[in-house]
Image: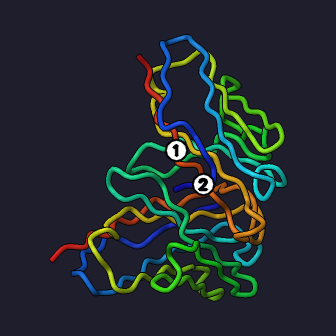
């Protein structure tokens, strides 16, 4: 079945970087986009950006440009979210989600979420 | 500040019908499909509605949605205690070339 499995929880110090993986299975990886979403404690969901695994095209939401990058590895059928210069406000649960199309569409499958805690 | 505007909260009693609105612009809702998600913090969001009005298999018909112009709404009838959650609308934005999210509505069942 279609599945997205994310890497485990991370604890990082301020200023460090973190990379979260999202391993896809059960479908043709390059045919569907992957989006990243996060939720900080007590806050609403935030859309971070997306990648088209077929051609590697990416787009970050404006508030995440500069510190966040998204990549994919078609041989590993995985997408990666990297956040640099971590600060306490980046403490959140991060989700990857598959879209119903290469870029746009609805999020029909979600990863289980990865908790990233930023603390000195 | 979210691109799509939702009321921050909504409430109803068991059995009641509640609606949640989502307002956007011609760059997003007015030109593209709307989706609705239910989210309980700490769990993955769940797709409730896609393509403005379509329900994925497994979503009860108590959940319905509509779209008109640059606004959309989600209706939940026969309200149940387990419907307590945060609800989000999403649409594609032609200017940002990416999806945009409503601020979310916390539904309380009184």
Please report, as a chain letter, where disc 2 is located. B
Around disc 2, counting alpha carbons within 10 Å, would you say few (fewer than 14), some (14 to 19), or many (20 or more)?
many
Q: Position of residue B47 (x, y in %)?
A: 63, 46
Residue of label 1: B104
Question: Do the residues bearing badges 1 and 2 touch, measured as CB atoms within 8 Å?
Answer: yes
What is the number of the mark on residue B54?
A: none
What's the CA distance linking mark 1 and mark 2?
Answer: 8 Å
Is there one chain holding both mark 1 and mark 2? yes
Question: What is the quadrant of residue A107 in the picture?
Answer: bottom right
Please say if B43 is above or below B105: below
Q: In percent of the image, x 50 and y 17: which residue is there? A: B12
Residue of label 2: B101
Please say if A66 is above or below A34: below
Secondary element type, mark 2: strand
In terms of depth relative to the viewer, which is nearer, B61 or A117?
A117
Secondary element type, mark 1: loop
In terms of depth relative to the viewer, which is nearer, A36 or B20?
B20
Please report, as a chain letter, where disc 1 is located. B
Q: Position of residue A119 (x, y in %)?
A: 19, 73
Q: In percent of the image, x 63 and y 50: which residue is there? A: B4
Q: Position of residue A50 (x, y in %)?
A: 63, 73
Q: Position of residue B87 (x, y in %)?
A: 54, 40
Q: In percent of the image, x 34 and y 70: which residue is there? A: A90
């Amino acid at each position: 079945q279609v599945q997205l499995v994310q890497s485990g929880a991370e604890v990082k110090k301020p200023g460090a970087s973190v990379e979260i993986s999202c391993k896809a299975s059960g479908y043709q990886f390059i045919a569907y986009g992957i989006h990243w979403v996060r939720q900080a404690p007590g806050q609403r969901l935030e859309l971070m950006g997306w990648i088209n695994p077929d051609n590697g095209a990416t787009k970050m939401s404006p508030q995440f440009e500069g510190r966040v990058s998204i990549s994919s590895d078609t041989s590993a059928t995985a997408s990666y979210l990297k956040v640099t210069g971590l600060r306490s406000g980046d403490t959140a649960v991060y989700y990857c989600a598959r879209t119903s199309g290469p870029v746009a569409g609805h999020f029909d499958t979600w990863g289980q979420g990865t908790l990233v805690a930023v603390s000195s | 500040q979210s691109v799509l505007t939702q009321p921050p909260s909504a409430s109803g009693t068991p059995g009641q019908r509640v609606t949640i609105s989502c307002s956007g612009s011609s760059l997003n809702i007015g030109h593209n499909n709307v989706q609705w998600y239910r989210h309980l913090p700490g769990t993955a969001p769940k797709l409730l509605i896609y393509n403005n009005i379509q329900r994925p298999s497994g979503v009860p018909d108590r959940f319905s949605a509509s779209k008109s112009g640059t606004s959309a709404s989600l209706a939940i009838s026969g309200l149940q205690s387990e419907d307590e959650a945060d609800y989000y609308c999403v649409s594609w934005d032609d200017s940002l070339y990416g999806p945009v999210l409503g601020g979310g509505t916390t539904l309380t069942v009184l």
